[in-house]
Each structure stands twice: as structure tokens, then as C-alpha cells.
Amino acid sequence: MPDVPDLTPPAAAPRSTYARELSGFHLMQSRACAVTVVVLILLGSVLDFAVYPDRMVQFGIYRVVASGAVLAGLALLYTPFGRRHVHAVTFVWLTFPQLMIAWMIHVTQGEASLFYAGIILTIFAVGTLFPVGFMYTLAFGALTMVLYWLACVMRPGQLDHAQFLFHFTIILFATAGSTVYTYYNERGRRQLFELKDELAGKNEELERTNRSLADIKGQMLQQEKMAALGTLSAGLLHEVNNPVNFCMMAIDMALEEPAAQAAPTVLECLQDARQGMQRVQYIVSDLKTFAYRNEAMQDAPFLFERALDAAVRLVGHETKGIAIRRTVGSEGGGDTMVRGDEAAIIGVLINLLGNAALALRKGARAAPEIVVGMQVEGARLRVSVLDNGPGIDAALLDRVFEPFFTTREVGQGLGLGLSISYSVVQRHGGQLAAESVPGEWTRLTFDLPRAG
């Protein structure tokens, strides 16, 4: 059965999955980092007390304001807008601590202020901990340098260019280092995701392979059972054939007796018995054809109608009360001589006729009928088995050839009949196909190579 093609572009699905996973990761980390930043901003009051104790109250107020702004950004991350624009919201709330530090630098010692270390710390934190890409890190570093430059040059008094250049260069180095780290961190995270995605794909492929191996093992086991049953049947048929021949010989001798010929009732009974023995002989002959699998006969010419006769006789107990009609196409003069494994084709026909008979009995049709059609098409003989049963639902029609798929009750079959038949027809270079109209009919068709 052909697989449904995957219409997704090769890289689209992983990118989409990676984007969703990364978005969830960024949202979670942005929320955690916002809480961390608020704690660090408030704990910075200890530094205010150590370095600028006279401005501790003033700085404390601004720390509370900056913390409130970060908490507002955190609250926004719990809204649909924040979840959709997590990077933009994170970038905005990250600017508030930098604005606060730049203002502290401006109102204290400018380029000589020790708070420039806080700016550098924030840049490294953005690059290593916060959920932003390397372009965000670069933009954040550039914004920080602009804020530091404004904080220093807008102070009244003379600017110490040497100290300003030294601190500004350190901030530039921090921005460059943090950006490079973020870039490779992103690449590493993407490669890790691709490896995980590839591993998941390999695991799914391995599971499919294991299921296929289990199916193949089941089919091989079934074939081994069938082979063992064939060997056993061959021995039993030989044993059955001898007493049948003895009975036929005794009946023929009895029919020649004058006493039997003089008694019409006895003569009729003997003739009925002979017909019954002949039927047993036919069944034994058909079973021998089905049981003996000679390798040399697996690509031999045989008359398809003869194989069909054998299959009809072998399923006679299942098709009692069901009309079996045959149609032969006019093209090719009705020649049904084909080439292949006659025993295997008999098995296919037994399976198709048996399934049709079962469907007809389940559907309780008033006039159940099976029509076997044969049509010569060039170098192939197309065969169809049509029944007027209840049909097959469209949802199940694509699964009828799957191994172990069956609609029968437990204990009435393994669901391997059509799967094995499909393989047999494929081995003959043909295709076994099913079509159905629920409530009206079901038809299975296959083709075989013609002899000659």
C-alpha cells in the first residue's frame, strides 16, 4: 500500500518545532530573570551604603521605581501580548536597570563612578543568562554605551577623557564578548535541538522497523505453519487416497454384478456412492495440488479456470447456498492459460472466495452471489471477484491488506489472508486491489502473466 506523502518542506517542520520550543524556553527564562533582576536591584542598596551613603535614600527610591518597572514587564509576560512578543518585552524591561545605573553615574562621579561595573555586569548577564538572541545582545550593548556616554558628557565640569575612554572601551569589550558568547550559545542550542529532533526521528524509524520486523516474523511464522500443514496434509492425502481407490474398485465391481443390475434401487445406490467417491477423489486431487509446493512448478503454465475449479470445490462448504457465476472476456478467445505458482494462486482464490462468502452471510442477502470475472488484457489476465454483500467502509478499505488487520471475531482469523495474497500476486508481477460501495458490493481484482 503506498504511504501518504509528506507535503511538509524538509526544514519547515524542525524550524517550526524549534521556534515553538524556543519561544516557551524564552518565556519561562524571561519570567525567572525578571524576578532575579528585581532582587539584585533591591540588594544593590548595600552597595549604595558602602560607596555613596549620603545618597542612599535617593538611590533607594530609584531602585524601587526600577524594580516596579521590571515587575510591570513581568506581569505583561503573563498576557497573550507578552507571550507573543516575549523578546521585545524582555528588551524593554532590561533597559530600566541600565537607565537607573546611567542616572546614578551621572549624579555621582561620571566617568569616575564605580557604578560602571554594574553596567558591565548587566551586559554579561544579558549575554549569558537572559533569553535574547545575539542581535538583541548587540543592540543592548550599543544602547548601554550610548547611555554611559550621555551620563558622562552631560555632567557639568571637565570630562576626564582618559578615564572615560578606558571605561567605555571596557564596556565595548563586554558587549563584543557577550555578543559572541550569545551567538555560539544560540548555535549550540540549535544544534542540540537538531540532534534531539534527529534522535527522535531515528527512534520513530526504529519503532517502525521493529513493527515491520514483528509483522514479517508473524507472516513467516504463518507461512511456516502453512508449510507444516501442507506437509502433514500431503501425508494424510496419500493415506486417504488408497482406501478411496479401494472403495472405487469395489463399487465398480459391484456395479458389474448381475444381481446389482437386476435391482434398480441397489444400482442407483451404488452409482450415488461412486459419484460420492469421485467427489472425494477430486477434493484429494485439489488438496494435493495445493499442498505439494514443487519449486519447479512455481513458474509453470496452468489453466486458470482449472485452478478456479479447485478453489471453488475446496471452499464448497463455505459457499453453500451462494451462487458462483463466471464471466470470461471475449478478447483473446477466452484463453485463460497463465504462468506462475498454481498452488499459490489457488490459495489466493480460496481466500478471496472465503472472504466473500463470509461477507455475504453476515449481510444476509436474499440472493447472495459471487461473480468471478476473467478478462484478457494484452499479456496479462485480469481476474475480479465481486460479491453483492454489505461492502467495506471507506475508512477500512485502505487497511484490508495490512498484516493482522481483520474485522472477524476473535479466534476466526489472524488477518494475514489478504496480506499473504497481496504478496503472492506481487510475486507474479501483479497488483491486488480492493474497491467497494458500502451496502452494495465489494470487488477484489488482480492480474497474472499469460503463458506463451
Image (cartoon, grey):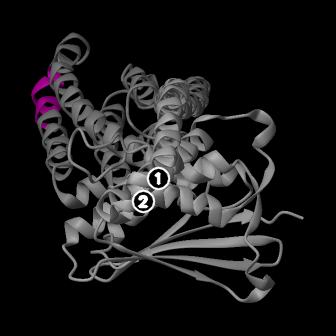
Q: Nearer the viewer, residue 289 or 260?
A: 260
Q: Which residues are magenta?
A: 54-61
Q: Please report the residue visible at 61 percent of the width from the left and 71 percent of the height from the top.
A: 383
Q: Which residue is mark 2?
A: 261
Q: Which residue is mark 1?
A: 255
Residue 336 lies, in percent from the top left, at: 73, 71
SS under mark 1: helix
Q: Looking at the image, is 61 positioned above or below residue 350?
A: above
| For residue 65, side relative to residue 322 (left or right) | left
Q: Looking at the image, is 327 positioned above or below residue 42?
A: below
Q: Looking at the image, is 43 positioned above or below residue 28?
A: above
Residue 126 lies, in percent from the top left, at: 42, 32
Q: Please report the residue visible at 67 percent of the width from the left and 85 percent of the height from the top.
A: 329
Snapshot quadrant of residue 445: bottom right
Number of numbered discs: 2
- Does the stretch in magenta take in 59? yes
SS under mark 2: helix
Name the kind of residue labelled 2 in the image. Answer: Gln
Q: Nearer the viewer, residue 419 or 54?
A: 419
